[in-house]
Image: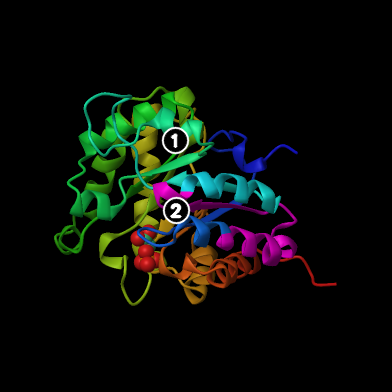
Amino acid sequence: MTDPASQPIQRGSSERRPLIIGTNTKLHHTPTETANYLRELGEKGQDLLDAGAVRLFLCPPYTSLPAAVPAARETGLPVWIGAQNVDGHLNGAFTGEISAPMLVALGTDLVLLGHAERRNLFGETNESLAKKVVVALAGGLRVMLCVGEKADDREHGVGVETVRRQVKIALSGIPVDQLDRVMIAYEPVWAIGAAAAAGPDDVRPIIAEITSALDDRFGEVRPDVPVLYGGSVSVGSVATLLNELPDLDGFLLGRVGLTVDGLLGVVEAALEARGQLAPTA
Ligand code: PGA
């Protein structure tokens, strides 16, 4: 079966791509716990996910990838397995790092790049991310580029400029024909690990800015790039965001996605908001 989420859609097309929803498990879940999570997803998720309206992804720690790839296939569900980071070099004297070819050799589908924790705790910059984007795409991975402004940027009214820089610099080294393997997750830093998600009025101008930055960099005749929201997403926040933001393509989950029930709760709420929840028999 061809995977509708994998087909490039040209910008401006009226075609609706499946929602893209998944979890970054951060520093949680051993290989066994990851495999069990996917097994449980396979058992509980079939009815909700049968219609092909949602594409899932799971980004576990590196050590769980070898267990996650076959476990995801066994679910029979459309689940991309992603890494949470990759090194910007193909090989060399970089102790402790993992390269894109190493991830590809494990069957990894995508890599999360530029998560706020990588930027703020591990010193990743837009420039270092640009190198990672190039090697990840050249190696055949999909890239989910995380962008988002800090509370301080927001207070000074420079949130949109911050995100524009993040997008344009991180994607500065790639040709337009690789853009169909790029997704962007907008995660305002002030909303990560917070009590509530950002509201539609916070997210709307940033989605517009991301679109404009992509047009600037790649031109308007380019593949459509899915834009997800992340940051304290809960079952309760999904409907408001989707109802008010027709250009939103999905969600990057943290805490709520650490359990299968949490992930599927978000999937169900999202399908309901989009009017795509299959009636129960
Ligand atoms: P959170 O994490 O949903 O727990 O805020 C989101 C993220 O860090 O991607």
Q: Position of residue 156 (x, y in %)?
A: 14, 60
The residue lying at 39 percent from left, 49 percent from top is: 208
| Circle number at residue 60 | 2
Q: Where does ligand 1 appear, by image quarter?
A: bottom left
Determine the CA span between mark 2 and mark 1: 12 Å
Q: Residue furthest front?
A: 32
Q: Is residue 272 visible?
A: yes
Amino acid type, callout 1 = Leu
Which image quadrant is residue 127 in? Answer: top left
Q: Residue at x 16, y 64 (%)?
A: 155
Label 1 sits on residue: 103
Closer to the chain start, of discs 2 and 1, is 2
How far from the left and from the top, in percent, is residue 33?
51, 62
Residue 238 in picture, x, y percent from top left: 51, 69
**Helix, strand, or loop for circle 1?**
helix
Identified at 80% across, 72% down, the residue is 280
Q: Amino acid at mark 2?
A: Pro
Between 26 and 47, the one nearer to me in the picture: 26
How many C-alpha atoms fall within 10 Å of the one at disc 2: few (<14), some, or many (≥20)?
A: many
Q: Which numbered tag is attached to residue 252? A: none
Residues rendered magenta in the picture: 36-64
